[in-house]
Amino acid sequence: MIVAYKNPKVPNNIFIEKLSKVYDQILNKGKEIILFGDFNIDMLCKENILQNNLCDIYDLYNIVTSPTCFKKVEGSLVDPVIVRNKHRFYCHINLPCGYSDHHNMIGLITKLQVPPKKPQRIVYRNLKNFNEESYVKDIQNIPFHICSIFDDISDQCSSKGEKAQREPCSLSAFCIKKRNVQKKYAKE
């Protein structure tokens, strides 16, 4: 990520030149470079130096499409989010935040994938063919006195649990591969 602020007193061509040098330096270091901040260059103008001298040269896209600053009544887009691959992003958020008298808060929702979770194995007692007499007999044969030789309470519990899990009834297992939990975001 490159976060930048251009003071309105700094000439646009000097800012773009410095920004291009920084972008060149990190271009080969990451899969996706996100460039954002308050550039004080209106991206809604048909001819702007940011579009012509940075985005077009590096084949970059501004994801934010609506005004982000409202110093003027019609608004201006001076807070772009510029990326190389716009298809890696689901949508952007452009909302008034209440912290600034004229700038909106800008956010980005990515489609970048997180490595899948490993399947979770759940073991449970299968009571389909449960035999109560056999179960009571197995419980009576558990050597509960053995746990008193351990000082640590967790060792005491595990010594009881291992015997109890092996003997009383059959165990079954199933795996949960992934949960289908999807949060829905409204596209602007």
Image (spheres, rainbow, N blue to C red):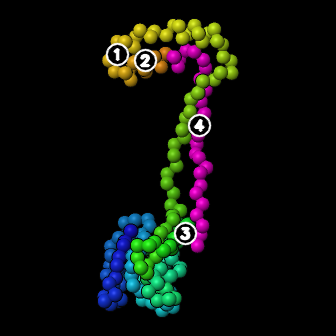
Q: Which residue position is annotated with label 2?
A: 159
Residue sitting nearer the eye, 36 or 26: 36
Answer with mark 3 or mark 1, whichever residue precedes in sequence. 3
Specify the amino acid type for callout 3: Cys
- Residue 8: within the magenta? no
The residue segment tinted magenta is: 164-188
Against 117, residue 152 (above or below) is: above
Judged from the image, the secondary structure of the residue bearing numbered disc 3 is: strand
| Residue 175: mark in rendering | 4
Determine whether the residue tagged by mark 2 lies in a helix, strand or loop.
helix
Residue 117 lies, with reference to residue 82, above or below; the image says: above
**For residue 159, side relative to residue 186 (left or right):** left
Say if 130 sits above or below 174 in the image.
Answer: above
Q: Give the mark, 4 or 1, whose residue is nearer the N terminus.
A: 1
The answer to which quarter of the image holds residue 171 is: top right
Picture coordinates of residue 38 (x, y %)?
39, 79
Q: What's the amino acid at mark 2?
A: Ser
Query: Farthest residue toward the bottom?
Result: 47
Closest to the observer, 51 or 8: 8
Q: Residue at x 59, y 30 (%)?
A: 173
Give yes or no for contact between labels 3 and 1 (Cβ–Cβ under 8 Å): no
Disc 4 vs disc 3: which is toward the camera?
3
**Above or below: residue 39 compared with residue 93:** below
Q: Quadrant of the C terminus?
A: bottom right
> Between marks 3 and 1, how big is the CA–CA gap?
58 Å
- Name the N-terminal-most of marks 2 and 4: 2
Sooner in the amino-acid sequence: mark 1 or mark 2: 1
- Distance, label 4 to label 3, CA atoms, is 33 Å
Q: Residue furthest right?
A: 128
